[in-house]
Amino acid sequence: AVLSNGSSDSSFKMPEIKFTKLFINGEFVDSVSGKTFETIDPRTGEVIARVAEGDKEDVDLAVKAARQAFDHGPWPRLSGSERGRIMMKFADLIDENLEELAVLEAIDAGKLFSLAKVIDIPGAGETLRYYAGAADKIRGEVLKMSRQLQGYTLREPIGVVGHIIPWNFPTSMFFMKVSPALAAGCTMLVKPAEQTPLTALYYAHLAKLAGIPDGVLNVVTGFGPTAGAAIASHMDIDKVSFTGSTDVGRLVMQAAAASNLKSVSLELGGKSPLLIFDDADVDTAADLALFGLLFNKGEICVASSRVYVQEGIYDEFVKKVVEKAKTWVVGDPFDPAVRQGPQVNKKQFDRILSYIEHGKREGATLLTGGKPVGDKGYYIEPTIFTDVKEDMLIAKDEIFGPVMSLMKFKTIEEGIKRANDTRYGLAAGIVTKDLNIANTVSRSIRAGIIWINCYLAFDKDCPYGGCKMSGFGRDCGLEAVYKFLHIKSVVTPIYDSPW
Ligand code: ADP
């Protein structure tokens, strides 16, 4: 990898951090315990700010506010278009503060500033507007029942929702979860990841300015095993919507079952295969494989971390992909030339490096990368292993970093079989010009999304989620609104029906 010279650093001014307290019932408040925790800049390892550390008592207060707002407040009782109008205002306020939000996202999560400015932050407004437009289209169905009965269904908001979100896409995750729940008429609390609490608190402030009533959207910053666990096991939360690791997803589901049987949706880990067939353009395919892996420094649950290349083009592909990885620019996320910023924190950085060591010990061949970049911050070289077998740890586990397992296959059947040889089922990619291969493989791979001749092609309208141990339930699309609604059937008898 090429290390950026960090030339942009000199012009960079650290922003003032305006919001560091919990947001409960429309007010910024200290945690009950008075405790705070540090949020760190992954470019340098230095502290950006101290943020209120919420725990069970704070979750209780937030749930109380959300329950009051649900049972007695205006939000669920407004018409869909009234809710939509407020959500549109919320979206406009995000656009007005774009620059400042993009800086916060870059320093807290190590995201490329150039991308935060054109993708993450504007995407938040777009997601809100999409669901604002859905808010007045929520309706039930007329039932076809036996002759003496008449019935219909109502779709009603599910109630108080707890959203637990990860650190890799702090803004996108926040709005993927919050927007459909707001459209549905739910009230909620959000627990951002402890690594990246800053933008969520800013959004709470903007929600209030937009006119979202107090208690509808609460934000409790804090740690997983304390604040997160309190949400999962709360007796007065109706639904928990979780995105994060498979291990924690299992804990959340157990806690939900052991408490009040709240409804659960889980978007968990992945180990997504990208299959490149002999007829592919090798240069384009190598670009796609690197983009699919290295976007957001591999900190994305759908990363194309297992790349299967058909034997006819394998050698040529290896040459190309290694060449490209070697010139990939890693460095300060404020430098426009940089394509890969720092890993989110020291823990992830160490974890990725230990997987790389494991890969070497397991007998995989390291083609390129494998080391940190520079001597400060958490930068890692794009790393490619070949001679990888499906039973090696680096091929089985989600590494969540810039590490590719490159493998060779012969036939379509072999490619499908090996692609499916994983406990995960989140995403898959196919590169071919052959329509029959594309269709056959798309139908044969067990995953929530298949990208043909593209990768990471997301859209607010495209349902997103997994199967197998990648979880269940869908974010994005109208499906996401339905997950925050429950169906009530209403039945009346008809006496003396003429039919
Ligand atoms: P990652 O491994 O990507 O950090 P995690 O699954 O650990 O992902 O974290 C995702 C979210 O889940 C974060 O907001 C984190 O605080 C929260 N979390 C972690 N542990 C628990 C837990 N035991 N119960 C509920 N939430 C948790």
Image: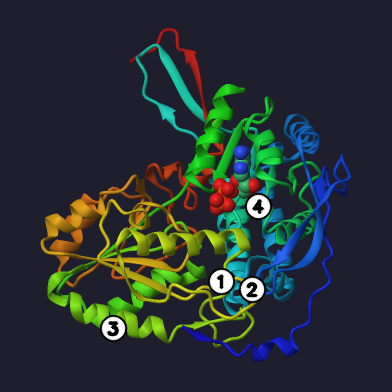
Residue neighbourhood size for the residue with mark 4, other residues' Cα within 10 Å, grouped as few (<14), some (14–19), many (≥20): many
Which of the two discs, 2 and 1, sits closer to the camera? 2
Amino acid on which the number 4 mark rests in the picture: Ala
Which of the two discs, 4 and 1, sits closer to the camera? 4
Which of the two discs, 3 and 4, sits closer to the camera? 3
Using the image, determine if residue 145 lies above or below residue 205: above
Distance of label 1 from label 3 (alpha carbons): 28 Å
- Element assignment for label 4: loop
Q: Is residue 475 visible?
A: yes
Distance of label 2 from label 1 (alpha carbons): 24 Å
Distance of label 3 from label 4 (alpha carbons): 37 Å
- The circle drawn on residue 119 is 1
Which of the two discs, 4 and 2, sits closer to the camera? 2
Residue neighbourhood size for the residue with mark 1, other residues' Cα within 10 Å, grouped as few (<14), some (14–19), many (≥20): few
Residue that carries the numbered disc 4 in the rendered image: 193
- Element assignment for label 2: loop
Q: Residue at x 43, y 63 (%)?
A: 357
* Between 429 and 495, the one nearer to me in the picture: 429
**Mark found first going from the N terminus, 1 or 3:** 1
Tell me where residue 87 sits by quadrant. bottom right
For the residue with label 1, is its CB less than 8 Å from the closest atom of ligand 1? no
**Mark found first going from the N terminus, 2 or 1:** 1
